[in-house]
Amino acid sequence: MEVKESYCEWSYASELDRKYHDNEWGLPIHDDRKQFEYLSLECFQCGLSWELMLKKREIFRCCFDNFDYDKVALYDELDVERILNTEGMIRSVQKIRAEINNAKCFQKIREEFGSFDDYLWGFSQGKTIYYKGHAEGSIPVSNGLSDKVSKDLKKRGFKYVGTITIYSHLQACGIINDHDEHCPCFRKILDNYPVIWKRRYKEVK
C-alpha cells in the first residue's frame, strides 16, 4: 500500500509553524549566528509556546542586533531597559540578562573551539543522529545527549539551558533528526547530510 507523505504533527499547526518546519527545523546548520539565534529563542521559550517565539522573532532580531553575539555581549543596563521597553517584547529582565550572559559565554566557546558550531557538533562527531524509534513518533523531550550538552553548557556559565531546552536545540539545528519517517524533510536530511544511526537505549538518562 502506498504511504502518503506527511509533515509530522506540524501539519496541524499554524501556517507560521509549518513554514518553520518545512524550511528550517531539523536541517543541519553550521553558522554561529544562526546557532545563537536558535539557542536564544529556545531559552526565551521556557514556560511559553514556540509559536509565540516565531511570532516575535523579528522583535527579537531588532532587540538583539540580529543576534550578533559580539554586539550582545557588550550590552549594558541601558540596553536592558531599551529591550524591556520595546513594544511587543517579552518583558522578562531575567531572560534578557541571561541572553547577554550567554553571548559572553558563546564568545568564550568560540575562542576555545574556533566556533560554537564546532563545539556543538563535536558531541555527534559532525553527524546528524537518527534514533531508531523516533521516526515512528516515540520522541522524548530530552535524552542522555541533551543531558550531557546541558551539563557542559551550564558548567561554562550559560543560563536557561536545561536538558529539555537543549534537546529542542539539537532537533532544531539538525544534530538530531526527529522528523516523522513519512515526512519529506526526514528523507531530505538522510539523503543529503552525514548521518549516524543509534539505538534509543544508547542515549537514555
Image (cartoon, helix red, strand yellow):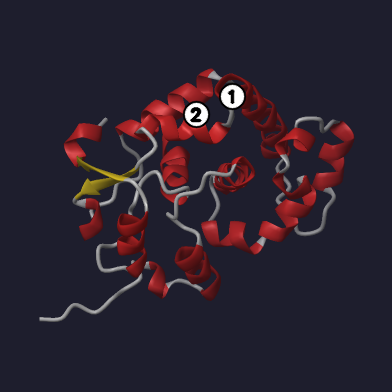
Q: Is 93 placed left or right of 109 in the picture?
A: right
Q: 149 or 110, which is in the foreground? A: 110
| Residue 109 badge | 1
- Residue most extreme to the left: 1
Examine the rendered structure and indicate whether residue 46 appears above or below residue 73. below
Query: Going 38% across and 26% down the picture, which residue do you hit?
Result: 148
Q: Quadrant of residue 99?
A: top right
Q: Is residue 160 in view? A: no
Mark 1 and mark 2: Cα distance apart in space: 7 Å
Q: 201 or 4, which is in the foreground? A: 4
Give neighbour class at mark 2: few <14, some 14-19, many 20+ (Cα, 10 Å). some
How many numbered discs? 2
Residue under circle 2? 119
Q: 42 or 175, which is in the foreground? A: 175
Q: Secondary structure at mark 2?
A: helix
Residue 42, image x and y in percent?
55, 46
Query: Going 81% across and 46% down the picture, which residue do you hit?
Result: 83
Residue 121, image x and y in percent?
44, 35
| Residue 150 badge | none
Query: Going 50% across and 65% down the picture, which residue do you hit?
Result: 23
Of the 4 image quadrants, the one containing the N terminus is bottom left
Residue 163, image x and y in percent?
42, 34
Examine the rendered structure and indicate whether residue 6 appears above or below residue 77. below
Identity, as a three-letter code, of the amino acid under mark 2: Tyr
* Contact check, label 1 and label 2, Cβ < 8 Å: yes
Q: Earlier in the sequence, mark 1 or mark 2?
A: 1
Examine the rendered structure and indicate whether residue 51 appears above or below residue 113. below
Q: Is 7 placed left or right of 46 in the picture?
A: left
Identity, as a three-letter code, of the amino acid under mark 1: Ile
